[in-house]
Each structure stands twice: as C-alpha cells, then as structure tokens.
Amino acid sequence: MKHYRYEKEPRQSGKVKSRSSVPLKKDGSHSGISLKTQPRTRARSSPDQIVEAAGFDQDQNPVADRRALICLSHLRWDFVYQRPQHLLTRSARADRVFFVEEPIFGEDGRARLEVSERAGGICVVVPHLPNNLREKEIAATEQRLLDELFVEHKIGEHLLWYYTPMALDFTRHLKPLCVIYDCMDELSLFKGAPPALKEREAELFAEADLVFTGGQSLYEAKRELHPRVYAFPSSIDAAHFAQARTLTEDPADQAGIPHPRLGFCGVLDERMDLELLSGIACTRPDWHLVMIGPIVKINPADLPQRPNIHYLGPKSYKNLPAYLAGWEVALLPFARNNSTRFISPTKTPEYLAAGRPVVSTSIRDVVRPYGKQKLVHIADTTDEFVRSIESAMNEDAAERVRRVDAFLAETSWDLTWQRMDELIEGVIDARRTTLATNTRPTVLQRPATLAVTGGIDRAGNLVA
C-alpha cells in the first residue's frame, strides 16, 4: 500500500514519499492556484476552460491524462466496506479517485494531508488539523490543503461526488465537470448530526447536477427537491457472498460458538434495537447471537450482555462469507426510530446471496421489496421475532434459494455503477454541447418518464 503525506513541516518520524511544497503568496493564495471563493457557473466542461477555471497554466501544469473524481465523505474508507467502496472502486477503472475524509484533529499544530493508496488505485486523503482552529479557520485550511492536492496531482478536469453536504464549506471555489450528491442516508436524523447540515444539504441540492439516493424511501423524500433525483437502492456482489453456501471451515473466533447461531454484521450504533436483542437472547437461551461489526456512537456498556450474545468486533469484507456460512439465520434487528426511517440496508441482499434466511424488523426498504416478495421474514416484537426465526429455520432452503437467485439475478454493483456513469456522462456531454452551441442543455431537465417515480428497477433500468 503506497503511503505518503503532505505537510507544512518535515515529519519527525515515518517515511514521507511526497510532500506538498506549493509556496504561499502574501494574500494567502498559492502561486498557480487561486484560493478566492468564486461562484460556480454551469458552463464548465471544455478542457481549456476547466484548466483555466482551476487556475492552472497549461504549459507549466498540464492536465493529467485521466479525469479525477473527488469524493467528499463523512465516512472513513477503512471503516466498513459498503456503498461508497463498491461504487468508487468501479469508478476508479476509468477515473483517478481521491476519497477525502473528514479531518483528524491533533496537538502538533500542523495542518497537513495524509494520502495513502488502496487497492484499485483509490487515493484516501485525510486532513490533519490543529485542535485550536475555529470553524471558519477549519474550512479555510481544508480548502488550502485541497488546493495543494490539486497542484501536487495535476488535477484538471474533475467531478465532485458528495456524501456529506458539510464539505461545501471548502469546495465552493472548485469548477467541476459535474456535481453528484449520492445521498445514502438521511444524515440529519443521525446522532451527532451538525446543526448546519440541513442548510448545507439545501445548498448542495441547488448546486448538484445529479442526486442519487441509497433507497426508495429516501428517493420519495427527496424527489421534489431536485429535477434529477434517481433511486439506486443497495446492490450486491452476489458471487462474493455466494461463497458462504459452500464454505465449511469456521473462523477461529466463531468456531467455539454453539449452534443454532443467529448472526448480524454491520455497524452497532443507535440504529440497533438493543431491547429486541436482549429479549431474543433471554427468551431462547439455547440460541446464540453472533454480532459482527464496530461499535459506534453508543456506549459499549449499553449493549446487552448475556452468555449467548457474542460480540466479535469488525471483520474484513473478504472474510464475511466465512462467518455467514456458519449461521442458521441472519438478522436485521434495527430499531424503528428517526435514524432508521430511510435506511436501505446493504446487508439484506448480501445475506440473501449468502443463502441465509433473513429476519428483519419492519424497515420500509426491507419490507419493500424483500418482505412483499416473501424473501425476508418481517417481525418487530420479541415474540414475533422468535416465531419468525423458528419459521426461517424450518423453511424449505432449496426453494428459498431458488427464489432468491431469481430475484438477485439482474442485480449487481456493476450494473448500478454502469447506470450512474451513463447519467454522469450524459450531463457532461450536454454541457459540452451547450458550450459549443451556447444553448441550455435539455438533458438537465427530468425526463418525462421519470416525473412520477424516477425509480430504478432491479436490472438498473429506469422505470416510469
């Protein structure tokens, strides 16, 4: 894994493979790139205009061969392998991808960027900032560091892909070919959400060319806020999880847990129904609950502690099928609260592809379509959950797998990314045409067939 840092001062320890050395002018700007905030214009797709808008001199800073996608995320790349990783690794087959995380604050008083390369050529960018910065200083410093990244990597033509609207505070001055907001959750309803989040999201809706949502419920909540909103629910790498159907060797930390096993893998946070977990474990002490994933935003001491509940911690995406192979039933024990109103759990199709029967609480994007298709058992109370688990363990497994495979046959992250990419390139092509003809691109209007639903079917196609 390539690993290097940008910083204002030499590091005292560790290997530095690359360091930004862009000089600052007296007005606080870099020689070669302006730091002044400029209003974004719609016409921004000509290569010459993109280079000029970014402040590059073509003779001294030629545009790199490949376009760049700059992703602004509230999530850490190495946290849990989920939607952003699936989509952006596919984007990286054509574009250079820079995944910019939220800053880490420290005591050393230096502002710097840490950039490390992951599989597939993804560049993970982590700002490190001093503790004592005020809010405006944080945004100004992040903007300066991002501009250094542009210079160091000779980024010319680029896309902006937002997961967090809060990143607008240090990206307003950029001139991207296309602005995409991949709205995978209703972040304003999550614990610890920034007070300004709703205001920034409204601004991002005004700036974005395309809005993708992580589920149908979220699409229904956002579709009137922008003319080009598209639903892209959780997809699946079916071949990866189908390995669980044939694996027989248990991971070492799971091997000693008795059967029957009921499993969950994902983030353990405020979305978990802890009372339900405790109730299941108490009602059936002969069942063993295997909980895989990091504990976030809740006190670990608040998790139910019983002899038949086993917390194994986070596991790599690569190893998940080995754990799922040893479960009798897979669980989605989400609480029904504000933080789960719009979630579309990626684990639903992953559990199914692994060949596990699934029991879930009545999360809307699980009920539709999985519950209605009788692919997932839906239950909410402890008694209902226990009965549903018993039913799941006694159902015809071969028949269930046959129906699951038919349902998932045309669902994949490859197809999801292909459709997203078509929409992005459509915006860029229309913008190039606009620059050439000086007319407003009709492609920026929602197609008439999307006026009612604008959804995406299981094959990734638009449906009316």
Image (spheres, rainbow, N blue to C red):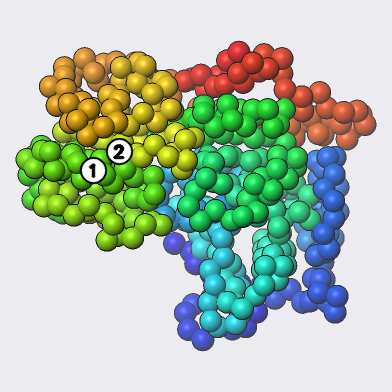
Tell me, yes or no, whether the two marked residues, 2 and 1, touch with CB atoms within 8 Å. yes
Give me the residue at 54% from left, 41% from top.
186
Residue 421 picture quarter: top right
* Rendered view: 433 above or below 307: above
Which type of secondary structure does the marked residue at label 1 adopt? helix
What residue would you read off at disc 1? 277
Give me the residue at 90% from left, 32% from top.
436
What residue would you read off at disc 2? 333
Mark 2 residue type: Pro
Give me the residue at 39% from left, 31% from top.
363
**Residue 7: % across, % down:** 62, 76
Q: Nearer the viewer, residue 196 or 219?
A: 196
Residue 132 picture quarter: bottom right
Q: Nearer the viewer, residue 366 or 419?
A: 366
**Residue 94: % across, % down:** 59, 41
Location of the N terminus (image quadrant): bottom left
Q: CA distance from mark 2 to mark 1?
A: 7 Å
Q: Is residue 134 left or right of residue 163?
A: right
* Rendered view: 414 above or below 176: above
